[in-house]
Amino acid sequence: MLKIIGSFLPKMTDPVCNMNVNRFDANGGVYVFESTKYYFCGTGCNKAFQKEPKEYLLGNKKIEM
Ligand SMILES: [Zn+2]
């Protein structure tokens, strides 16, 4: 039986603004942090995440779009 796991789905969540991002067409590119790939809706979110990745992953910081 085939199992579909999350990483095969094209829709990923931008950790900065929580928008859905298509991982095959991420406008903001990709950033790898602690062996996990994150996808971004725009370069602004990507840069913000690179500055303080943990703040966004812990939910301490968020950008509303
Ligand atoms: Zn975003």
Image: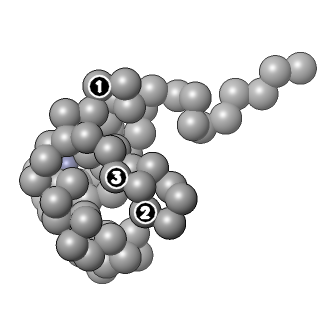
Of callouts 2 and 1, the N-terminal one: 1
Q: Which residue is mark 3?
A: 31
Answer yes or no: disc 2 within 8 Å of ligand 1: no
Residue at 17 percent of width and 65 percent of height: 48
Q: Which residue is mark 2?
A: 33
**Quadrant of res 16:** bottom left
**Can you see residue 53?**
yes
Residue at 16 percent of width and 60 percent of height: 47
Q: CA distance from mark 2 to mark 1?
A: 19 Å
Residue at 32 percent of width and 44 percent of height: 30
**Amino acid beneath label 2:** Phe
x, y percent for residue 8: 58, 29
**Amino acid beneath label 3:** Tyr
Q: In this rendering, is residue 44 above or below 42?
A: below
Numbered tag placed on residue 25 in the rendering: 1
Q: How many marks?
A: 3
Classed neighbour count for the residue bearing mark 1: other residues with Cα under 10 Å, few (<14), some (14–19), many (≥20) = few
Left or right: residue 32 compared with residue 41: right
**Quadrant of res 28:** top left
Q: How is the image coloured?
A: one colour
